[in-house]
Amino acid sequence: MSLLLPLPLLLSAMLAVQAVATMEVYVPDLPVVALHGRDVTLNCSFSPTGPFNASDVTVFWQLTDTKRTVYGYSEGQHQLADQAESFVNRTGLFPHELGLGNASLLLRKVVVADEGSFTCFVRVKEYGSSALFLQVAAPYSKPIVTLEPESNLRPGEEVALTCMAYGGYPEADVTWQDGGGRNLTENVTTSVVANEEGLFSLTSVLTVVLEPNSTYTCRLINPLLGEEGNAFVTITGQNISFPPVALWVTVGLAVCLLVLLVALAAVCRRKIKESCEEARREAEEAKELEEEESKTAMTLLKS
Ligand SMILES: *[C@@H]1O[C@H](CO)[C@@H](O)[C@H](O)[C@H]1NC(C)=O
Ligand SMILES: *[C@@H]1O[C@H](CO)[C@@H](O)[C@H](O)[C@H]1NC(C)=O
Ligand SMILES: *[C@@H]1O[C@H](CO)[C@@H](O)[C@H](O)[C@H]1NC(C)=O
Ligand SMILES: *[C@@H]1O[C@H](CO)[C@@H](O)[C@H](O)[C@H]1NC(C)=O
C-alpha cells in the first residue's frame, strides 16, 4: 500500500507516474509577494474527478530547485521526518480546507532565504503538481540625505550628497532630482550591502556642482512595494561661504569708498572754511568801504 511508504519513496512513486497524472493542481501564475517577518499562504488547490475523504489526500510541498522538503501530509497527519531545518515549526496546512480541494500551505515568519519556487504535489486517487514563485519584500527605512562637507561650501565646487536607507528587500531603484525636477541619476553611484537576514542597506551618492539655493531629492522605489519614500536636502546661502576673491574685492572696495569719503569731507571742510573767510573779508571790505564813503561824504559836506 503506497500510503504506508516513507514520504520520499511515495513522492518518487508519484513522480514516476507523473507522465500519466490526470489531476489538475492549481497555483497562482504570478509570483506571490510576502512581507519579511509576516506569514504567507501559498495557495494550491486541486479538483479530483470523484468524491474523496480528507484522509485520502496526500500533500507534499517541496523546493522546486533543491528538492528539499518543505512540508508533507498523509493519512490525516503531518509527515515532517525529512523536513528541511529552515522550515521547522513554520509550516502547516488548513486541514478543514483539504476536503474542499484546498492544499494551501501556511508559511510563518517569512525570511529572505524563502524566496524561490515551491512545488505543490497532491495525490488523491490520481495526482498532479504545480509550482509557484514566492517573492519576499521588506520596506526600507525612510531615506536620509546628508551633505559632505556640511559647511564652507563654495559655489562651483563639487559636493557629494549621500542618500541612505536600511532594512529593505529587494534592491530598490534610486532616482535623484533637483528642485526643477531634472533627472540627475546619471551621476549617481548606488551600492547595497546585505545583513545576515539578507536585508539590504542602500547607499547612493550623487556628485553635483554646487549652486546656491538648490534642492536635491533622493527617491526610493521598491520594485515590489512601489514608492517608499524620499528625502531631500536644500543648499541655502548659509551653507556657502564667501569665496576669498569676492571677499577681498569687497573689502578693497569698502576701504576705497571710505578713503574717498574722508577725502571728500576734508575738501568740503576746507572749501566751506575758505568761502566763510571770503565772505567775512568781503563783509569787512564792504564795511571799510562804507566807512570810507561816509568819511568822504562828510568831508564833502564840510568842504
Ligand atoms: C520548534 O518548536 C519546538 C516546540 O515549541 C521547540 O522545542 C523547537 O526548538 C523548535 N524548533 C525550531 C527549529 O525552532
Ligand atoms: C484555501 O484556504 C486558504 C486558508 O483558509 C484560503 O486563504 C484560500 O483562499 C483557499 N483557497 C481556495 C482556492 O479556496
Ligand atoms: C554629470 O557630470 C558631468 C561631469 O561632472 C556633467 O557634465 C553633467 O552635466 C552631469 N549630469 C547631470 C545630469 O547633472
Ligand atoms: C533618470 O536617468 C537614469 C539614467 O540616466 C534612468 O535610468 C532613469 O530611468 C531616469 N529616471 C527617470 C525618472 O526619468
Image: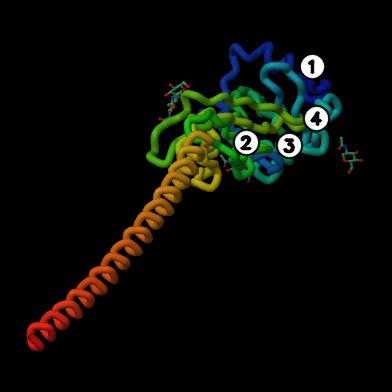
Q: Is residue 274 above or below residue 26?
A: below
- Name the mark on residue 149: 2
Give amino acid for label 4.
Ser
The answer to which of marks 4 and 2 sits earlier in the sequence is 4
Which element type, helix, strand or loop, lies under badge 4? helix
Give amino acid for label 3.
Ser
Give amino acid for label 2.
Pro
User: Mark 4 packing: few (<14 Cα in 10 Å), some, or many (20+)?
Assistant: few
Q: Nearer the viewer, residue 104 or 169?
A: 169
Q: CA distance from mark 4 to mark 2?
A: 46 Å
Give the quadrant of the N terminus: top right
Q: How is the image coloured?
A: rainbow
The answer to which of marks 3 and 2 sits earlier in the sequence is 3
Q: CA distance from mark 4 to mark 3?
A: 27 Å
Give amino acid for label 1.
Leu
Q: Nearer the viewer, residue 255 or 39?
A: 255
Q: Is mark 3 within 8 Å of ligand 2?
A: no
- Name the mark on residue 9: 1
Q: Is mark 4 within 8 Å of ligand 1?
A: no
The answer to which of marks 4 and 1 sits earlier in the sequence is 1
Q: x%, y% of residue 120?
A: 65, 27
Q: CA distance from mark 3 to mark 2?
A: 69 Å
Give the residue number, with chain letter if any, for mark 3. 55
- Which of discs 4 and 3 lies nearer the camera? The answer is 4
- Name the mark on residue 86: 4
Q: Residue 63, can we see it?
A: yes
- Which of discs 4 and 1 lies nearer the camera? The answer is 4
